Amino acid sequence: RNRGGGGAGGGDFSSWYDDVDDDASPDDIFWEEMERQKLLSQIGGDGSSSSSSSSSGGSGGGVIPPGVGSIGTTEQQTFVSSSQPPNRAADGLTLEEERSADATLAQFKPFIVSDNWLDEHYEAPGDEEKEDGADEEDEIWDVYGDGNDGGGDDDGAGNRILLDAQKLMAIPELEKYRVPYEGLDEDMMQDAEEEYRERLSWITIKSRRLENARNSPKAKDYFAREPNEREGFDRMWVSAIDSPCLNNLVGVFRDYGVQFADNFDDWEDQSSEDSQWSIEDVASYKARKVYEVTGLPCIASRTSFEVEPARSRPELEAPGRVSNMNPKVATGYKFNNVGEHVDYLVAALKPQSDPTRVTRFTTCLCYYDGEMEIRDYGECDCDIYFSSSLRSFIPMSSAINEMMKTLQLTHGLEYQHWLKTKKREAMQGHGGVILKLRDRVLKDAVVLPNRIIDVSAFMDSKIDVNLMDECAEELANRFINMKPTKILTVATTGLVIAIPMAKYLQIPCVYARKERSVVMADTFSAAYSSKTVGKNRELLVSTKHIDEDDRVLIIDDFLSSGSSQDALLRIVSDAGATAVGVGVLMEKIYDSGRQSLSGYAIPVESLVGVKSVSEGIIRLQEEEGIDDM
């Protein structure tokens, strides 16, 4: 079983990987590989050494392999003497790949934990022999609120609360559901809160955008603005979560009327100790800091990543032999944040680990509003073979859903409250002005032979001023959030609704003439046609009446083909002003008016929709709320 003549005196050590002899046993192969590793450690070769490296080995010196010169001698010897587990011999790494993985793992030494077994049914080797009380280390709840980490030194380090990596991060499952202030009176709760604030004061992570908001004179007004009721929001909050997950958070909470003013996602650690705090502490710190600056309730997040230690596989270890897995590969790891380092670590561990080695992503969401703090969690266990930083979306989504359920109970949030409110308002409206207008249309309107609807009995030649005033108030409420600065309408029929609307909105009313007046010098003009006034007509507006900075609301009595409204919108465009919407009393649904205006991308509101006028009978569209009355 001569493996190619390699030895300490020279030769190609890669030839040891030639085809295995037919009579070679697995034990023969394993021990020959161990011999090869021993020879390599003596000459400092990499398995493909040239004549120069062979001559270096002949001197008998301990040459450090390239690329690991920064690693201490002891660690270097551990590296070169380690080999891949027997179960990975068929697809093992080259020495260069092992060396690269070893250097990567060395960077994560501060995050090593040795006993974070993630499978609750797995019993680590030797656990069954541990006697009760053998582990004297305090649990996290035993030292919670003590104000120190158990040390007795007087150099100030004792006041740094729980900065030991394992103590900070080994949060038992019970901690998630423990109520820290349960059974405490008000004074004790206040003391506990002060102690917790002192604990968080040692965290130093910062958000550049949050500091900018703190120093900006305009930020206070920005965060104090009212939620957009037109979009169905009745609460304004703020968030501090990873930006890729923001759409998930916004999408879940918008159905409950919560609008997020901003998201602060640029948090950066300022010291090595920041990477050792528990995700609960970091999430709480972020939520409190954002609330301090914005004055708004905040939802903040932090996600941790764990890799359990390599599990013992007795069936792969011959009697009397010691497992030769690299200690950096065999140990567990835990981080209190997720980023590129997760992918680097997984890439280094995956080729040398059992594919079913468990990794865990845990997300803590913290809600804080100045009076109470609420935490919820999401968790995802994943085999290392499939693990990557992208898996962090799973526990984040779970935590968001759990937080929604908790806050729904806490604040009495109602699902799609805005839609139900709108329906109630619509029903109330149908009992008031809209129902009155519908009744007058069905009672007094007349269909003429050319399908023109004659409403002269109450809103043209003869005007019901009380009804028009109520209709104007209803339309004004629909457009008030658009912040119009002027109303533009057509003389004379549009004035019946435009003038009272201008009163409610407290803005000027401008009307377009159909013929030029002697007082009109420079004008904006637009051609249009209508069934009531004929073809090739023109609308004229004085250039003095519309400015570039105006926000113009178009108001008319009818929306039929959309020709007159389109002409008014073209005049607004010629003036360089901004059109914010179109409002009408009645809309002929069977005509193409709304479609013809769709290209302007502005809201179109009508109080009554006429579905058809066939056979001289006016049929109205059933509005929301009518069916339930």
Image (cartoon, rainbow, N blue to C red):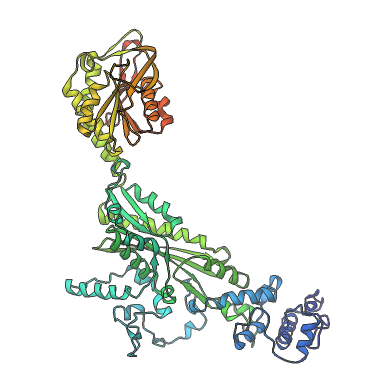
Q: Residue furthest top?
A: 449
Which quadrant of the rendered structure holds the N terminus? bottom right
Residue 421, can we see it?
yes
**The furthest residue to the bottom:** 60
User: Is the residue 527 above or below the residue 152 in the image?
Assistant: above
Tell whether 252 sits left or right of 106. Answer: left
Spot the residue most to the left.
466
Residues 139 and 150: in front is 150
User: Taking 564 as reference, is 52 above or below it?
Assistant: below
Q: Quadrant of residue 518?
A: top left
Quadrant (top left/top right/bottom left/bottom right) for the C terminus: top left
User: Residue visible at 24% across and 74% down?
Assistant: 194
- Nearest the viewer among 378 and 146 is 146
Do we see residue 590 in this rendering? no
Measuring from the top left, give residue 45's x and y in whole percent: 73, 82
Classify residue 406 as left or right of residue 167.
Answer: left
Left or right: residue 405 versus residue 384 is left
Name which quarter of the figure residue 71 lies in: bottom right
Question: Where residue 527 sits: x, y (%)?
Answer: 40, 18
Q: Nearest the camera: 277 or 317?
A: 277
Depth order, front residue of 424/461 = 461
| Image coordinates for residue 420, horizontal then vertical, percent | 28, 40
Image label count: 0
Q: Is residue 438 above or below residue 293?
A: above
Residue in the image at 76% along x and 92% along y: 59
**Is residue 213 shown above or below 53?**
above
Residue 421 at what x, y percent from top left? 26, 40
Residue at 30% over, 52% down: 222
